[in-house]
Amino acid sequence: MDEKTLQSILDMHQAMNIEVFYWWCTAIMFLIHAGFLAYEIGASRSKNALASGMKNVLTLASIIPAFYFVGWWIYNAFPNGLIPIEASAALPWSASMRPDADDMGTGIFFAAFALFGATTGSILSGAVIERIRLGAFLILAVILGAGVWILAGAWGWHPDGWMLHKLGYHDVGAAGVVHAVAGFFALGVVLNLGARIGKYSKDGTPQVIAPHNMPMTLIGLMLIIVGFFGFLGGCIIFNTGDIGWTTIYGNRTNLSAFAFNTLMGFGGGVIGAYLSSRDPFWTMSGALGGIITVAAGLDLYNPGLAFVLAVTGGALMPKIGALLEKRGLDDSVGAFAVHGFCGFYGVVLVGIFAAGFPNVGEGVPDVSFTGQLTGAVVMALTGFIPGWGVAYLLKKFNLLRVPPHVEVLGLDLFEVPAKAYPESLSSETSSSVPARSGGVVAAPMDKRPDIS
């Protein structure tokens, strides 16, 4: 066998290894959505459990094809800003967007990116449970998951993206382009959607609306953490030849760096949230908050520093949730605190603790505090403006929120319709309890108003 044949065989096996790696990253990412499914079902009251579950299933089913038809093209067409460049190969009718035995990259990268998009929809889903119309939610989720986030991705997560070349933007684990964008989008929606009936007393005091199944919520959060290993694996580039692993920006890295700091982020976030809240829900959410806090600099941080930063993110997260709650914003599962705040915070932290890190490419600025802060603001506005704007239009046409009598009786009976626990007695009657700092705790639910 000659040298040329051997090289051809080696190249083929390298390409197959890349396919296999991203195939399993995508499969593991599905656990994120299994986790969100359990998490939101458990966080809902029993009368809304199936509606929350169906919303999560339909999120995946809607965003994935929408991403195929428009999202992949947006990523390839808009790295320079709002004026598209030529990207016909990413259009759904192009030869590269269908099975091709000679193309072992496009489909597998599309799949990973589509699951990133679906994750943004699931982040939004938790914030709006128990009062949003299913159709309105799916419109918002598709706009976010197949449009808004991937536009941000083209700017800040593309090797030719203007945020890298103008700002030196560094966000290897998508703290900004996925989490901050989705969290601020959710904030814009919640501002228009309003609080659940009974969430606030007549004097404006927040009331606890307790999860009907806290253990399921905690299990769901742990499944999301498992899925994060697939998510973060999809954030690293498996190259052919002798290049090895690189970040999305071309900097050398490896899975070992991601392993150190993902695990330290997990531990630090849990500890910080526990010390700050002593609340089971926020403690487990701290795992997400801690990982997101260090995600932008996973490839750069010393593990000890990653742990400390994650502790701060985990500790601040419940406080941000409580602050929103006191201001009358009913983010049902703390999605903004976990994803929006920690994503923004994590991007800025890279500018503090990794300032001066050299980016790859001629003329590309080094990482800087100004660049990271500007990038974080861009991500926040990119999420918030369309989230608020589309939700406002839906509200004006009376399409955003279910009628009060539907909300009181439960979305399961009207949006599904079915009962999650048909053999059990009705569990909708309960008493009001003031909210503890941090928001969601296991306690009796608020008394529902008489709609007779």
Image (cartoon, rainbow, N blue to C red):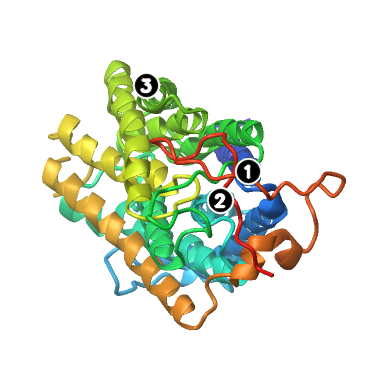
Distance from label 1 to label 3 (Cα)?
A: 31 Å
The residue indicated by pointer 2 is 115
Q: Amino acid at mark 3?
A: Leu
Q: Nearer the viewer, residue 93 or 59?
A: 59
Q: In the image, which disc is placed on residue 353?
A: none
Q: Residue furthest right?
A: 423
Q: Which of the two discs, 1 and 3, sits closer to the camera? A: 3
Write the residue at 46% across / 72% down.
Answer: 88
Location of residue 73 in the rendering, given as x and y in whole percent from the top left corner: 46, 67
Determine whether 204 is above or below 39 in the image.
below
N-terminal-most mark, 2 or 3: 2
Write the residue at 42% across / 26% down.
Answer: 262
Q: Which of the two discs, 2 and 3, sits closer to the camera? A: 3
Write the residue at 53% across / 60% down.
Answer: 197
> If the image is split into quadrants, where does the N terminus sit?
top right
Determine whether 446 is above or below 225 in the image.
below
Q: Nearer the viewer, residue 192 or 444?
A: 444
Q: Are marks 2 and 1 in contact (CB under 8 Å)?
A: yes
Q: Is residue 424 left or right of residue 333?
A: right
Write the residue at 44% across / 71% down.
Answer: 391
Q: Nearer the viewer, residue 139 or 156?
A: 139
- Secondary structure beneath dot 1 equals helix
The residue indicated by pointer 1 is 30
Q: Is residue 366 left or right of residue 109?
A: left
The residue indicated by pointer 3 is 275
- Secondary structure beneath dot 3 equals helix
